[in-house]
Amino acid sequence: MSNQSAAPRRRKTLRQMLRLSWRDYAHEKLLSACAVLGLAAVLTPLLVLYGVKFGVMQTLTDRLRSEPRTLEISPVVSGRFSMKYLDDLAAHPDVAFVLPRTRSIAATMDLVAGQGTDRTTLLVSLEPTATGDPLLQRYGASSPAMPQHPDKEAIGVSLSATAAEKLHVSVGDTITGRVERRYSGQMQSVRVPLQIASVLPLAAQQKDVAFIPLPLLEATEDYRDGRAVPELGTSNGWTGEARPQETRLYPGFRLYAKDLDAVMRLRQGFAQQKLDVYTHAEEIEQINSLARALNLVFALICAATAAGFLASTTSSTLASVKRKERTLGLLNLAGFITGELMLLPLTQSLLTALLGTALASGLYALAAVAINHLFSASLSGMEQVCRLLPQHFLLAFAAVAGLALAAALGPALRAARIEPSEVIREV
């Protein structure tokens, strides 16, 4: 027979064998249903278990990732950091935001709100901020900015919730910032008008803090050091000595990593520079350790389940081939070749894998809805305790199909080796 005539025949017999496999699978509906239910009974708990593991770990990781303070890194002790060093840090691929800090003793300011008997004064700590500040972005707060003429216009400021409550102010209000110093043996002070650009919620900052543009923070330090700040107006009292010409050095910085993994890498990088830093690396490592432990436990459970499923499917397929020896022998006698005869058990195992996975996915969906409803009080937004992605279902089907085919391969070879003469003798 030529190759041109053999190809259509193979396609025809292939279709016949696939159709025959399906009809036989449907004919033995009770046994087929038992096989599908057996697979679903094994696979559903695994899907629910992995869904809970993935959902819980994803929720914990998302909570850490969405909390800017988890990504914050700051030096333990004061150092001497130049702006070039900080610019190099800002250019690092693991750094999302960095600004220098001035000396903490100079980073305070009295905020004055109200008039007369309603006048309120509050001492707040100052933090530098700028456009792109992850903490302000996380809570949708507007970033304060320096006006074009800071000596004549109010400068923007973001207040923590506690500071705003104590001053009885809100967004858009104008308050006065007062900085004092002892210079030439006399107590002196200057005032600067501030306009509240935003108020951070209590979750963002629980202390009395004002987030101000870096130039104002530097001006506050310069003034306390006895230097003049012409940008804010010497006529407004910002007088003193001229600033030195040498490069300005900062004792610290306020840095945010791009993601959780970047925190670990940056911490290692600072350690190589012999610079001790405050990080939340311990919390991140605890989450990563928990994820690794759960992955190991789940892998062991999957391995044990896969071994059981492999043995069960092999025995049931072998029993099916044994029951159909006469039919397979007649098919062999009718001209079906080895590969085509092997299709019968392989196709039926694949059908069981497909239907069993579909049934298990449906049962998982019901269980996931119940579990997420049960723990809904401790969840927020789109968080879910039990959650699987579409690729997880595809991966589950691929694994089940691979195991089913592997388990059916031995019985399929046995089916292909049935001699027609043995069947003829029994007829």
Image: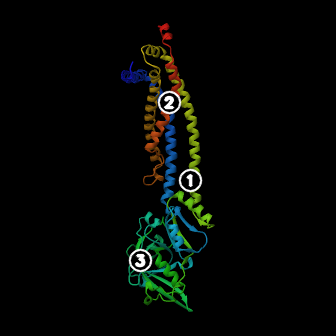
Q: Residue furthest front?
A: 2
Place of residue 405 in the rendered image (x, y in percent of width and height, measured from the top left):
49, 29
Looking at the image, residue 301 sits to the left or right of residue 4; the answer is: right
Looking at the image, residue 83 sits to the left or right of residue 12; the answer is: right
Query: Real-space Cα distance between discs 1 and 2?
Result: 35 Å
- Residue at (52% x, 46% y) in the render: 53
What residue is shown with label 1?
A: 287
- Residue at (52% x, 81% y) in the render: 221
When the figure is inspected, residue 263 is found, relative to residue 340, above or below; the finding is below
The mark closer to the camera, 1 or 2, is 2
Residues under numbered marks 2 and 3 in contact, where contact means CB atoms less than 8 Å apart: no
What kind of element bears circle 3? Answer: loop
Query: Which image quadrant is residue 145 in?
Result: bottom left
Q: Can residue 234 be spotted in the picture? A: yes
What residue is shown with label 2?
A: 404
What residue is shown with label 3?
A: 146
Q: Amino acid at mark 1?
A: Ile
What kind of element bears circle 2? Answer: helix
When the figure is inspected, residue 132 is found, relative to residue 247, above or below; the finding is above
Place of residue 90 in the rendered image (x, y in percent of width and height, measured from the top left):
50, 67
Between residue 337 and residue 47, name the one nearer to us.
Answer: 337
Q: Amino acid at mark 2?
A: Ala
